[in-house]
Image: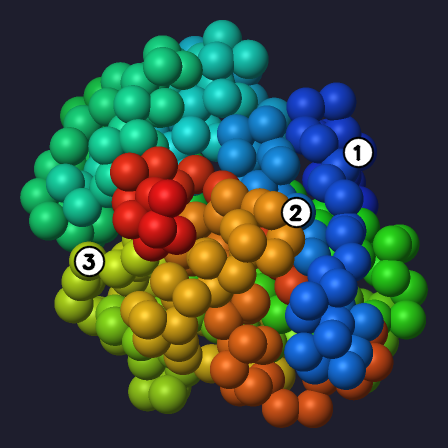
Amino acid sequence: MQPGDITLRDVYRARRTIAPYVRRTPLARSASLSEKTGAEVCLKLECLQDTGAFKLRGATNRLMNLSEAERARGVIAVSTGNHGRGVSAAACRLGIRAVICMSDLVPDNKVQAIRDLGADVRIVGRSQDDAEVEARRLVDEEGLVWVSPFDDPFVIAGQGTIGLELLEDMPDIDTAIVPLSGGGLIGGIALALKSATRDIRVIGVTMENGAAMYESQRAGKPVPVDEEPSLADCLTGSLGLENHYTFDLVRDHVDDMLLVSEEQIADAVRHAYRQERLIVEGGASVGIAALLNGLAGDIGAKVAVVISGGNIDMDKFDKIVGA
């Protein structure tokens, strides 16, 4: 399958598949951001997903589409935390063995949440690339089924169900602002929105340091980046030099990509808590950061900001908000 072969029909199939297991999250108006921008700004609250992040959608769709033989082999994933938790939750529900490989940059709270779901956790190296080397070894040696965090048609279609919900709840949407990492989330959402009309603007936002998709799009091909500690830890990691789907999806369907600083991310986490009464992780707050700092340009009258997760380490959260 090629990127152009992933269609709106696949996203609708995914919604039917995952509906019994995944929450349809609310789209809530933000009075503070609406006043700040002069637009009607609503927040898509994936932080209220059962696992605390959107990743449950794609992971569930992928595992539900495994053959019986593949289920018997078990699955393996590389994760900065939220994908591993989504895979582990889906695997636990379906009675499938799950192995999750992560680097030691992954926050302890995310590691423990995955262990609590019964997954076999392997901590390897200082980057997602290091963890992937171990995961690929286990695929070869133990026959485990690889579950990509983003570069997989079933995962992309699962994340794209957010786009369907946005169209239903805000049919006159002008702009969607979405966290940008490996491209599965924004690629799926953009595919769904642009299938309705190319006029909807889709903006990706990511952190300044180690922005893999941003740097890859600038280079015109997937390129390696150095991972650095960030408040947006869920957005770190590379695309893979042999990226099959998400690089092209982002190139073809995303209108703009923005960078935000660590200070801007911290301010956005504080804003979400103090003004919206939401606990969000750094990577989920980047859309708020873009709006607070006037980075998104002409956003139109109707704007949706995807709040992708709330799985922040609470000690880190307390330091950021000054609790």
The residues tagged by marks 2 and 3 sit, at their Cα atoms, a distance apart of: 25 Å
243 to the left or right of 188: left
Is there CB contact under 8 Å for labels 1 and 2? Answer: no
51 to the left or right of 139: right
Indicate whether 268 appears above or below 90.
below
Indicate whether 104 appears above or below 109.
below
Three-letter residue code for mark 3: Pro
Q: Position of residue 65 (x, y in %)?
A: 60, 30
Q: Which residue is mark 2?
A: 45
Indicate whether 209 appears above or below 170.
below
111 to the left or right of 192: left
Which numbered disc, 1 or 3, marks the residue that appears first in the sequence? 1
Q: Is residue 149 visible?
A: yes
Regarding mark 2 in the picture, which secondary structure is present there?
strand
Q: Is residue 213 visible?
A: no
Three-letter residue code for mark 2: Leu
